[in-house]
Amino acid sequence: MKRTITDELKMFPRFNPVGESAILLEIDEELSLEINRRVYALDTCIQANPLRGVREWVPAYSSMLVIFDPLLVGISEVKSWLKNCLENVSDNEVQKAKKVVIPVHYGGENGPDLNHVASYHHLSPGEVVRRHTAQTYHVGMMGFTPGFAYLLGLDLSLATPRLKSPRTNVPAGSVGIAGGQTGIYPLESPGGWQLIGRTDLALFNPDQPPYFLLAPGDEVQFKAINMGAF
Amino acid sequence: MPLFVENASLIMSLQDLGRFGFMRFGLPESGPMDWRAFGSANRLVDNPPDSACLEVGFTDASLRLEKDALFAICGVGYQIYLNGRQMPLWMSFWVQKGDRLDFEKTPGGNWVYLAAAGGISSQVWMGSRSVYPKGGLGRLLQRGDRIPIGESTHQSRWDAGWFIPQANRPAYDRDVSAGVIPGPHYERFTDEAQAAFWQQKFKVTSRSDRMGYRLQGENLAHRTGVDLLSQGMVMGEIQVPSDGQPIVMMPDHPTTGGYTSIGTICRPDLPLIAQAQPGISEINFVKINPNDARDRLIKATNDIDKIEKPQEDIWTHL
């Protein structure tokens, strides 16, 4: 049977140049915890087997972007090194994820949308907090703004659409829900997520290391500081 | 504080080569829009290649100098006046305490870089002096700001007069031809869109800044879905959202994105795009493979080192 271009696009893993200074490895096009864990097993492998000229690499949900200096290393050498890393990654490889507990003030002025999220799902605010703190989340990738973690693992009974009109100023540390995602705003910025709480921890502190509270691949647990209030 | 900002341009900031290693945390590299002009300015005043420069963009600016120093200004789209007398770009010159330096915006480009011998010694965040306001790393310069300059061994006007010959500068032009490496999602565009991408001329829109340049042209239609799971992105990458109008990633670009990329502008030609003027320049893209792009990158990098000095003292003629 003749293979179509669309079929070609579905063949994984795919290695593609991104300019002369980077390679994108797409492991899959699905969003799943299993595939994401493979990305982080690869991340560990890359870190353990450095190649001269590779400057940095950016893990994402189901892909890995490797950026190199083409004056120090050739693109074909980077590709075979990356391929070799991928082949030597076992799906069962347990990566040592760092676990981060994030204390959160839920509701009130820290979480102005908690009541809305609760009534949207016909739950009490306390039950929303209970379900939000019950899960262990996984940092699938980071991006959007410095220190922003895309967390996998929201209890989908809490999935809530974004605000119809975004706020112009969301305070740093705000914890929100948008569709099936949950996350924390590292910096004060505009935003349309439903805000259910706020943490006092700095997600991003450029003044001293460690600059970021979370790293890609980490496990995250929210803890209610004010559980008694519900 | 040797540099006093009397008037700041629309986008004016301090930039070194950028900060590396934090893209996985969502922090872009930042650094100069035009790395070739930036590198040349530093070279002409004998600075290390990663020294911080003043990046001036899009509108007029003025400085008052509070110290004698050796300067070089490289780039395009500006005329420079020292105490009202026009100065050449791409050449080092000596300035004295009390001098006034005016950057007058002219057609031809968007950005110039001022390098001072000794380098700009502003605040360092995470290993770099590059300002990235969106991430809380400093802010754009404003009227009344003072900029510090480091110590230098170049202490007289006899160190001035070094220049980069025209042939070794980027070929800035109203009609821009830029090399693009197709991918990583080139096959996701229709045959018509692929052909149009290489054949048509794009314009830069005014919705362009240090994060990205929005281009305008014929709609580039996708064969399959527009959206992808978010992936890492690099400078020069050309993303095409569902409206079919490309966006070129610039130094402060988001580190990840979920749109398909039709290709990536090769690094040697990225300065030509950075200097393409909104609404005026016409850009056409030419296919290039990664190895040829690498060869051109080597040449462009070497050109920065080809500085010359006239036999006689140029100052006697000015």
Image (cartoon, coloured by chain):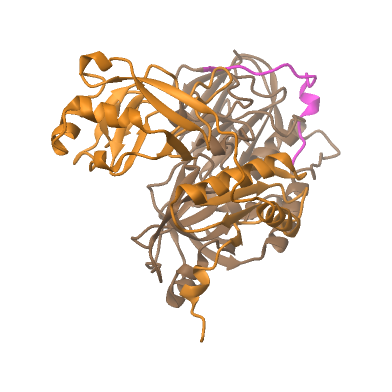
Left or right: B131 in relation to A115: right
Residue sitting farthest toward the bottom: A1
Q: Quadrant of residue B219?
A: bottom left
Image spot of residue B112 (x, y percent): 57, 38
Q: Nearer the viewer, residue B215 or A43?
A: A43
Left or right: B169 in relation to B181: right
Q: Which residue is at a point 68% across and 36% down the rendered structure image?
A: B41
Image height of B84 relative to B147, above or below:
below
The number of discs equals 0
Image spot of residue B308 (x, y percent): 81, 42
Q: The orange chain is which one?
A: A
The answer to whether residue A112 shows anywhere in this view is no
Magenta run includes residue B160: yes
Q: Give the range drawn in magenta.
A: B146-163
Q: Nearer the viewer, residue B185 or B39?
A: B185
Q: Which residue is at a point 64% across and 38% down the rendered structure image?
A: B38
Q: Colour of chain B?
A: brown
Q: In which quarter of the image is the N terminus of chain B?
A: top right
Predominant secondary structure in magenta? loop
Left or right: A90 in relation to B111: right
Image height of B181 relative to A193, above or below:
below
Image spot of residue B15 (x, y percent): 58, 31
